[in-house]
Image (cartoon, rainbow, N blue to C red):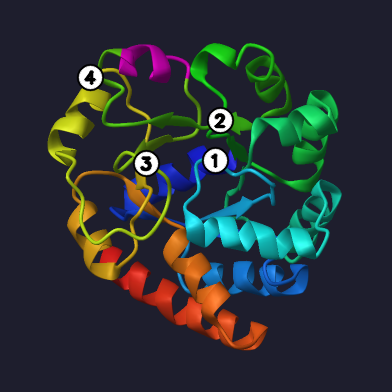
Amino acid sequence: MKRIEKLFNALKSANRKALATFVTAGDPDLNTTKELVRTMIAKGADIIELGIPYSDPIAEGPVIQAANVRAMKNKISVADVFKLVKEVRSDGMEAPLLFLLYYNVVFQYGIDRFLTACAESGVDGLIIPDLPFEEQGELKPQCIKYGVDLITMVSPVSEERIGKLVKNADGFLYCVSSLGVTGVRTSFQTDFGKFMKQIEAYSSLPKMIGFGVSTPEQVKSLKEFADGVIVGSAIVKRVGDAATPEKAVKEVGIFVDELRNSLN
């Protein structure tokens, strides 16, 4: 059984919701990223998403864009991120770990080579915002071959496309909270009850709400609609605002603890 499936089965049995947290690999440096991953898991994160630095992260708002710039100044390579994953796995981390990245990263690295490295290092899934469903034909079979889940993103405007999008989805469904790019939001206009019912009509996969979820209060208000939440920009902002890497790890730990408590 894959780690993602195993996690959601365990959470369902325990009547718990999943917390996925995101950081950009190499921001402010790879050692700090490793400590952030360890701390987030220790404080209650169930799934870790690592962003692979990219020069044109079109789905990201200013907070994560800035993190990409900081990481790229450190000349973080894809090979560096795979090495990081191997290191956290060697520490005994069993939580699902996903990459959020852009398709050109995979293409330039080589699809087969990239997925081989995912399988060997312990990457469980890929979230690729700029890869439309209709263009997955080259990548999807390779993901299946190597046991890596290609996570499907569904937005409130997908509507009549939802059935097609989720038909052969793997892992969980990334339910985009609202239109636009990632970033901290003060409120949501989406009718989540209606949105989730539309998805449930076509798929029984776990549903995770992400994009803009940024406070414990928002997490608490959203948990009734889905199987979990994804928090990214609010964590990355704390990393970027911290005076030192040590303070970044401490602040993120406190925040993830608060998020976890809001889901319990």
Q: Nearer the viewer, mark 4 or mark 2?
A: 2
Looking at the rendering, the stretch of residues picked out in magenta corresponds to 161-168
Q: Label 2's element?
A: loop
Residue type for callout 4: Ala
Check disc 1 and give the amino acid type. Answer: Ile
Report, in whole angstroms, how far the alpha carbon at label 4 lies from the one at label 1.
30 Å
How far across and down, in percent of the image, does residue 107 sit? 77, 27
Question: Dividing the picture into quarters, in which one does residue 157 lie?
Answer: top left
Labels 1 and 2 touching (C-beta < 8 A): yes
Would you say 257 lies left or right of 127 here?
left
Specify whether residue 264 is in view. no
Q: Which mark is residue 180?
A: 3
Q: What distance separates the C-alpha of mark 1 from that of mark 2?
A: 8 Å
**Which mark's residue is nearer the viewer, 2 or 3?**
3
Dot 2 corresponds to which residue? 130
234 vs 128: above or below: below
Query: To which residue does mark 1 refer?
Result: 58
How far across and down, in percent of the image, does residue 52 sit? Answer: 68, 49
Q: Residue at x 39, y 12 (%)?
A: 164
Q: Quadrant of residue 206?
A: top left
Q: Is residue 183 visible?
A: yes
Q: Which mark is residue 201?
A: 4
| Label 4 vs label 1, nearer the camera | 1
Above-or-below relation of 251 to 128 = below
